[in-house]
Amino acid sequence: MLIGGYGPDYDLITPVRMTSDGLRAAGPQARLVLPDGMEVYGARLSCRGPELHAIVRGSWYRTDLNQLSEGA
């Protein structure tokens, strides 16, 4: 999973699969949003194992990366 981008794509989620030929798209792109649908602008993102951790405006959120790829 690649998360982020430049400019308006700061919250873009891109599922990828690593192959012997390099990275390949593994599903449609989507936007990363908070549980209430609000944007994650300014979030500090970190992954540990299969989990994404996001700190947004003093609140800590955690989700499974597999759930993100299923929802994309």
Image: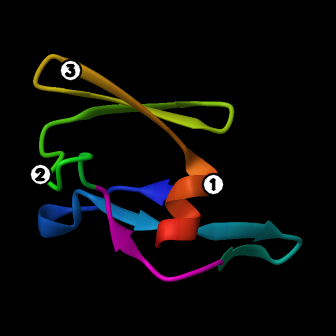
Residue named by callout 2: 38
- Secondary structure under the numbered disc 3 in the rendered image: strand
* Amino acid marked by disc 2: Met
Disc sitting over residue 59 in the figure: 3
Q: Is the magenta stretch mostly helix, strand or loop?
A: loop
In the rendered image, the residue lying farthest to the top is: 58
Mark 1 closeness class: few <14, some 14–19, many ≥20 residues within 10 Å: few
* Amino acid marked by disc 3: Ser
Task: Give how far across and how far down residue 43 sits, in percent.
Answer: 21, 35
* Amino acid marked by disc 1: Asn
Q: Can residue 21 be seen in this view?
A: yes
Q: What stretch is highlighted in magenta?
A: 26-32
Task: Give how far across and how far down residue 5 sits, in percent.
Answer: 29, 61
Mark 2 closeness class: few <14, some 14–19, many ≥20 residues within 10 Å: few
Q: In this view, does 52 lie above or below 23?
A: above
* Separation of marks 1 and 3 at Cα, in angstroms: 22 Å
Classify the position of the N terminus by image quarter.
bottom right
Task: Give how far across and how far down residue 27 sits, in percent.
Answer: 58, 80
Task: Give how far across and how far down residue 50 sits, in percent.
Answer: 66, 38
Residue named by callout 1: 66
**N-term-proximal mark, 2 vs 1:** 2
